Image: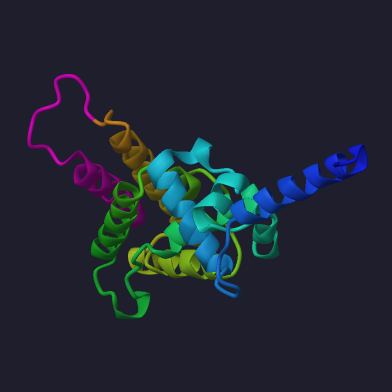
Amino acid sequence: MRTWYATISARPAVAYDVLVSQRPRRPYGTLHRDVVIDAALQVIERDGLAALTMRRLAQQLDAGTMSLYRHVADRDDVLDAVGQRLLLSIEVPDPSSTTDWPGAIRALMTSIRSVALEHPRSFELMALRQLSGGAVDDRVASALLLLEPSGLSRAEQLVLARTLVSFVNGFALAEIRGTTRFAGEPDGVDAFSAGIDLILAGAAAGSRD
């Protein structure tokens, strides 16, 4: 006959066995920061930014939630890393081999737009978060070098850079939401290229004053 003590003590053991059998298993040594960020990007693009939680990310990776904290600090760290990943995927023309600085800027802005359209649900992490440090700073510095042949002062170059980036980020975010056209705007107008050209024309006129 089973005693009351045996009945009670057996219950936690059964529950523990069930928990162990259901625990996600991932091969040891296969989890690292790049893998975590890859998974976060997949979750965001599939399910949206709000869906990304540390628990959901662990499920995506077939890993325990606490194991993620060996590689990332928290959700904000993950979001910053995703934004940095997108920023570093932008193709920046080599400043040392560029003879046509307006053409190089057009190519750079087009690359930013392409990243946005390729990652529509993650792009705001690059466009709206304050990203800095290491490779990100190096990439931004390289992009700014494209403006040195413009004839503008350093302060004017920074204003132009901010204007261009604000334009392309705003245009891309609107494009993602399907709100880029104004009522009465004629068909066949490449508003993106036209906008970049207007900004660069204004900068060129300013450099001649």
**104 over 193 or under it: above or below:** below
Residue at the image position 28 percent from the left and 75 percent from the top? 98
Residue 51 can be seen in this image: yes
Tell me if residue 178 comes above or below residue 161 in the rendering: above
Residue drawn at (87%, 45%), measured in percent from left and top? 6
Furthest toward the bottom, the residue is 96
In this rendered view, identify the residue nearer to me: 49 or 167. 49
Q: Nearer the viewer, residue 66 or 5?
A: 5
Q: Nearer the viewer, residue 66 or 135?
A: 66
All told, the count of numbered labels is 0
Picture quarter containing residue 24? Answer: bottom right
Dominant SS in magenta: helix
Q: Image quadrant for the N terminus? A: top right
Name the quadrant containing residue 194. Answer: top left
Instruction: Tell me if residue 153 can be seen.
Output: no
Image location of residue 152, percent across then percent down:
41, 60
Question: Which residue range is magenta in the image?
Answer: 181-209
Q: Position of residue 95 (x, y in %)?
A: 36, 74
In the rendered structure, the answer to whether residue 140 lies left or right of residue 170 reads right
What percent of the width, then of the height, locates residue 208?
31, 56
The picture places residue 32, in percent across and down from the top left corner, at 58, 69
Q: Is residue 167 magenta?
A: no
Task: Decide if residue 20 is on the left or right side of residue 62.
Answer: right
- Farthest top residue in view: 183
The residue at the point 69 percent across, 53 percent down is: 17
Whether the magenta-drawn stretch holds residue 187 is answered as yes
